[in-house]
Amino acid sequence: MIETGFERARQVRRTTLTAVLLLAALGAPLRAGEEAAAAPLQLEYLLLLTHPNLHLVSVEITAGKVAGDSLDFVMPAWSPGRYAIYNFAKNVQEFEALGATGQPLAWSSLDKQTWRVAAGRAGGTVRVRYRVFANDLNGSFSQFDRTHANLNGPSIFMYVAGHKQDPLTLRVETPENWQLVSGFSEDSRARTFLAPNYDRLLDTPLEASAEIKLEQFQEQGKTIRVAVHSYGEEADTAKLVAGLKKIVGAEMAGMPRPDFAHYTFIFHFAPELTMGDGMEHLNSTQIMLRGSANNSREEALETAAHEFFHLWNVKRLRPAGLGPFDYTREVYTPSLWFAEGVTTYLAYLALLRSGLWTREEFLERLAEEIRAFEEAPGRTLMSAESSSFYAWFYDRAPQMQETNFANSTISYYNKGALLGMLLDLEIRSRTRGAKTLLDVLRLLYQRFYEAPAASYYGPGRGYEEPDILQAVNEVAGSDLVAFFENGARGVGPLPYDAALAAAGMTLRVSELGGAPPGLGATTTSDSRGARVLDVRPGGAADRAGIGRDDLLTAIDNQSLVTESLETRLRAYPPGASVPFTVERQGREEIIFLTLDPPDQKSYAIRERAGATAEQIALRGQWLGR
């Protein structure tokens, strides 16, 4: 549902354009993210990196060949690849507008992210200036300090409404001794770049610093660059680059030759970073990790395998709605489980194929994905498609009110990875090893990305959810609608046993040795005991009436200050009725809990005894011989 303010502002912008009035009269509304066919502007962007101590980035946008009475400058509300409304306009300050001779132009705010400039007396040129506060090292935000500038377009650059499709020039002024690395150019000394449209500007993050370590290698005639910025110890990049070579080689061997001349990995290693991140772009990626290039290399390579595969799945082959973008509001798709989750699985497979992971490490990671999903209470409530559609609620979105997400949601990454594994095994089984899930990706890539362009955004068009099923059916040579109804659209049990059996494998689930009886709740340590964070429906805590925020201070009069909850619970067998001292809202009471079997279980994928020759052959094809 569109908020009233957004819709009103967008309608005002539309009515300023004759072409849009004509479309409205003909009853042909614009698709989400598309721009009206207005006469192109001559657009130049200037980025000034001059105030690192204040974390302020200065931006100047010059629009030439202006013919109308006004221009609307809009700051995005979100960043593609991160499905959360961040309202980047909150960090914009000191906005001003000037005409051709430098005369001040009147402007007004239409809503929280739109500035309307009176252009009637501008002399055909409107120049706006503003500054952006940037001090977050993150795949969606930006950071500018004395060591570097890491700039993600949506948090920095406004666009001119009705002109996202216009080509533009970007000039960047940096301190003299800084290198500038981006997907725009292989030359770190370049400071002027051409972008075919605003979307490409936003899809090309910039990293500028005097402290960048830059290396490169070739794969299939493509230049792959590796840029490392580190706050910690001196980065030893040799092993990182060696691992990237293996990943890039494995993934490029399985997919169509990409249509770029060069691709850039931008790594950031920061000891004090609170949360890592990775973000895909058309011909680059940004990866931020806590630690150093030396002690975080394995995590860096795993993230890189995921982000690099995105150059096919998401950045080129993409769900409908994900390009061209409407940056003012949410853009919905039920297909993130395929775009992100299947990418996760195929990245795992690439790590195996590259030799960076052993067969045991690959199976261990898949078993961990199964454990995470099976222990998620939301698996019986939320489908993979619903998790994708409602990503805007929880994809690193700020939460000011309490939610029940722990019990009511699942991760489209997690279930999507499992669906990818199951689909891959199902396709291999039904085709006797002749086809795999990669054949589905290649077919969709050909059918949608290599199709005629549907908009200014770039080659091809987006797919709809039924298109995935159609491609799977064609590759498998049989009907998998029941699989999709249960796996993607439904919440039923996933068919691990049947899929793994086709490869002579089995899933073993057992109680974890030494695990305490289950409480059916998530807790955190408190100075006076254990604070309840979430209660799982139907578990011991739920049956006893324990709720979120309750403070558990003792078990059978044994303090939870001097010993941990887990240690105290080990003294009792499952099924025991145990008195807990519970404090809630300043009152203390005794509540008896009948303990569950251990919450923690061990999941492992093992070879099945008595596997047939055909199953063993399929296993070898899947895992490598």
Image (tube, helix red, strand yellow):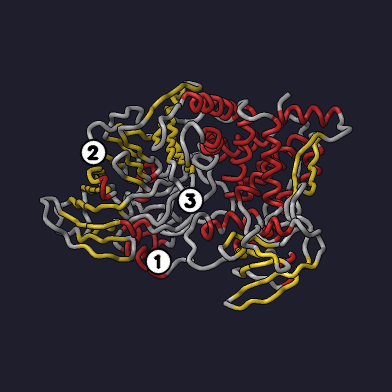
Q: Please report contact status of discs 3 and 1: CB closer than 8 Å, yes or no.
A: no
Q: How far is disc 2 from disc 3 in space, using C-alphas?
A: 28 Å
**For this view, does 618 lie left or right of residue 589?**
right
Q: Earlier in the sequence, mark 2 or mark 1?
A: 1
Observer able to see residue 450: no
Instruction: Pick whichever of labels 2 and 3 is earlier in the sequence.
Output: 3
Name which residue lies at 43% across and 68% down: 3
Q: In the structure shown, which secondary structural element does the residue marked by tag 3 occupy?
A: loop
Q: Which residue is mark 3?
A: 82
Q: Is the residue under label 1 in contact with that under label 2 (CB below 8 Å)? A: no
Which circle marks residue 173 in the picture? Answer: 2
Q: CA distance from mark 3 to mark 1?
A: 22 Å
- Mark 2 secondary-structure assignment: strand
Q: Position of residue 186 (x, y in %)?
A: 36, 28
Q: Amino acid at mark 2?
A: Glu
- Residue 516 location, x and y as percent? 74, 55
Q: Is residue 354 visible?
A: yes
Pick the front one: 539 or 335: 539
Residue picked out by circle 1: 7
Q: Compared to 68, does 457 lie above or below?
A: above
Q: Residue at x 50, y 36 (%)?
A: 311
Quadrant hosting residue 2: bottom left
Q: Where is residue 605 shown, x and y percent of the image?
A: 76, 39
For marks 3 and 1, the one nearer the N-term is: 1
Q: Does 612 sit left or right of 35 as displayed?
A: right
Q: Nearer the viewer, residue 210 or 258?
A: 210
Q: Nearer the viewer, residue 197 or 108?
A: 108
* Amino acid type, callout 3: Arg
